Amino acid sequence: MPLGSGILKGFATVFKVGARKPATVMYPENVRDIAYRFRGQVGMRRDEVANGLTCVGCGLCETACPNDVIRVDTSEGEDGTRVVDRYLFDVGRCVFCYFCIEACPVDALQRTHDFHLVTEDRRGLVIDGFKMIDIYEHDLENRSLEDQNIGPGTRPRLWFGDD
Amino acid sequence: MSNELISLTVDGTEVQVPAGSTVLQACESIGVEIPTLCTDPRLDPYGACRMCVVEIQPGPPRPMASCTMQAAPGMNVVTDSKSIKDIRKHVIELQLQHHPLDCPYCDQAGTCELQDETFAQEIHQSPYETVPKAHPEEVLNEVILINHNRCILCGRCVRICDEQIGVYALDFVHRAIGTFIAPAQHKEMDCERCGMCIETCPVGALLSRPFKHAARSWQTDKTASTCPHCSVGCSVLVESRHGDVVRTRTNGLEEPANGILCAKGFFGHSYVNSDDRLTQPLIRRNGRLEPATWREAISHVSGALRGVIDRNGADAVGAVGSPNCTNEDNYALQRFAREVIGSNNVYSQASGFHETFHALASVLGGQALLRSQSELLESDVILVIGADIGQTHNVVGAHVKRAARRNGRQLLVATRLASTLDQYAEATVRVRPGGEAALLAALAGRDDLPEAVTGVSDESLHAMRDALAAAGSIAVVWDTGVWTLGRVETLAQAAAGFAQAYTDVRLFPLAERANTVGTLLTGMAPDMLPGLRPVTDADARAEVETMTGATTPQDPGPSLAAFLDGSARALYVMGEDLVGSAGDPDAMRGQLEDLDLLIVQDIFMSPTAEVADVVLPGASFAEKGGHFTNFEGRRGPLAPAIIPVGDARPDWEVIARLAAALGNDFGWRSHEPISDELENLWRMPDVEGGEPIADLNGALSQANGAEGFTLATEQHLYTAGVTGRHAPSLSLMLPDAVAELNPADAQDLGLADGDPISVASHTGALNLKTLVASRVPRGVVNLPDRFLDAPPRRLDPTGPNGIPVQVTKR
């Protein structure tokens, strides 16, 4: 091999790669396209009638969760039904397995594509149900049309009253 | 059930069971599981649900309910044939036709027997058109509600209320498809609020209102513990979640509870998480109690105690223990006082039981006391005297009712007020308030006590005497609560006389609070060491020293009153409200204010704590380990269900830290070493009897000739002192201090429920609210004790029971 051919080969590689379209994007100014099965933060559906959480406080998500992420505190409401006093979700512990979404009997929990989970304080990783509604609704607005009703947990389920 | 064994075959396996067993029991004895919905080990077989059907050969050519079928020799039982499985599946499918599938909303989900069976029978879809019922939930009373939609009509609530509690507050209404469960007249359910219907309900039909929607059943941590309310010492299962006690339930079928609880046991736990709990140490600075850290509090208390001991000597320091605290707490306090401070001034306020015990033991011997509940229930005749134990010790009352009705015991009731036991009694008499001891003496054979003294006619008296004379064994049961105040000695002597007049008499003086007996046996007395060893006995002191290393001063201390009048300069009060429970609260407050140092360790801010120099937050029953000693002398274990609220600490730990700060570390880092140490010292009292019975003539013949009302002081089922005040569900049942009046008397005075009323004696007056109660006889007014703002002993500090009072409308 003639002297200097190695360095030329090196330069060639550098220029070739340098001219290629970059695989990375300048986050957070630019964001990559997300596969529609991508597992982002768990969101919550808004109960349009009561303008609150759809959650009925059954605690199945809390039970299904392998990582002790969710805490639901409930009490008796004025009309005798169960009301959710507080719905807490610790994003810092979540492994995005979506067991909670599977468990939810009223489809209150929903998948989203949101992965902007960064905070400056660990305590900011614990979000409540209303924050989860915001995340879900914001995510819904920014999703493409074909994404709207597809994916685990968003399929309407047979439940009592609608069989 | 006899001991004779019979043998039969279950699914090809040979089984031997005692004659009289049911087929269901035979199957369960070899582990063959048979699904049931209407079976409860506390109840008789009923055969409502038809889930337990089996095929029996030889036998009728149809499936038989195994729960009601008696096992017979040579039976061949088939439990798992295809047709049997089909029937079971069919039963559940039919139940689900009307049962709403609202499991995510239902509090019973997770412990629901119908839910479990639906899974076990692998039912995924109903073959029928489902017609869910849509009745609204119905509130039955302050604590119980019913959801008829979920009811499967197994009748367990109806039966447990009838068979176990003896109240029979619920029953089936209407017939066939229209059947539902309701209280009499379909009105409010006026029962004892024991919650057993909720407990036994296999589905979510009967629900606890305090627990409603507080947690899902599988989310709670379950801790076996002992009920803190009365001296029955029922075992309870404390369920907690995220540091809150959410409910208590029955725990097992063992003695003494035998699987049931009362209103206080089932609903009276919520004081644990009350917002009024003391959560941090308080030190008085510039006349005000200000928050402090434990480090500050311990060093402040140890320094101040050291100062008092240096100035006035160890005899100027005293300690008051509490029947609300565990054996370990009380033991720690008396060891602290005797060893670290060097003073025998150790007290507890449970005078009623302690005095009764000493008086009876001196005559009959210690072995005659602290007998087991089974001995009570197996006696031929059970005589209840004075207070209604159905109110004061509800669970024992329920067992007595059951013994009378189901096991053929003769129940004689001689209470001041109409009692909950009356309807099951062989004979019932109304004793005049104050005449209880006289009645006992009269029953024991004295003929010189007229009806004016006892309130009982000669005819009834002779009938009762005949019943007693014919009995092989007699149990005498009486509560030693506030009504015995001032009469403890007389009652005890009369009971001792009674015991000597008949054969095989078993005496059951029932202690008032959870650990009253424990304070007696852990040495919370100025003259007694743990295990009722006399302080003056040098051998006993040496024995305690060898076993624990703790030294004891040799001179017994004076009584609490004498101590406070005399040398007292500092007092350590643990879990007791001296001011609130005093006959003259102002005088007691004055005496406590005069002390150089008053340390109060409690779970709530009591009137005593308000005058304290240092207030230390203690832990409630659900937050610490230890033992309560019940009226039988049985020790019921406590286990911490939650971590103490705020900075509260278990009482033994505070004392141990204080001892360490004073240079004497006991080395206790958990309650177990204390339990072990106490275990070595523990013994049932072996007090020698044989002393003659005191002459009671003067004490017995007091007839109440005065005009006006006679006062009875009988505890109400729903009053539980300071803990009850802070338990919302109990406060709902009886919110205010009341005076109970006969309906006719109330009408004469123009009073209705809730009207303000004044009850006055020669020494004081109390302002209360009227409660019209048919249980009170005419001419008697009853003040339930343990309302802090109106303790009846304010009407007569020496003993308010039976005194004449004036009742006026305010």
Image: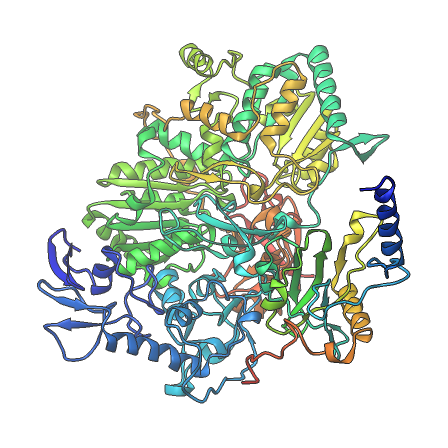
| Residue B458 seen by the camera | no
Decide which of B531, B16 is in the foreground and name it.
B16
Say if B53 sits above or below A64 in the image.
below
Q: Residue at x 84, y 51 (%)?
A: A13
List x then y, in percent, for residue B333: 57, 25
| Residue B637 seen by the camera | yes
List x then y, in percent, for residue B613: 75, 29
Residue B768 sits in which quadrant? bottom right
Decide which of B157, B514 is in the foreground and name it.
B157
Figure quadrant of the C terminus of chain A: bottom right
List x then y, in percent, for residue B408: 24, 57
Residue B141 sits in which quadrant? bottom right
Q: Residue at x 34, y 63 (%)?
A: B40
| Number of marks present in the image shown | 0
A142 lies left or right of B761:
right
A16 lies left or right of B213:
right
Figure quadrant of the N terminus of chain A: top right
Say if B318 sits above or below B457 in the image.
above
Decide which of A100, A144 is in the foreground and name it.
A144
**Which color scheme did the rendering employ for the protein?**
rainbow
Q: Residue at x 43, y 38 (%)?
A: B699
Residue B697 sits in which quadrant? top left
List x then y, in percent, for residue B486: 50, 38
Decide which of A97, B60 is in the foreground and name it.
A97
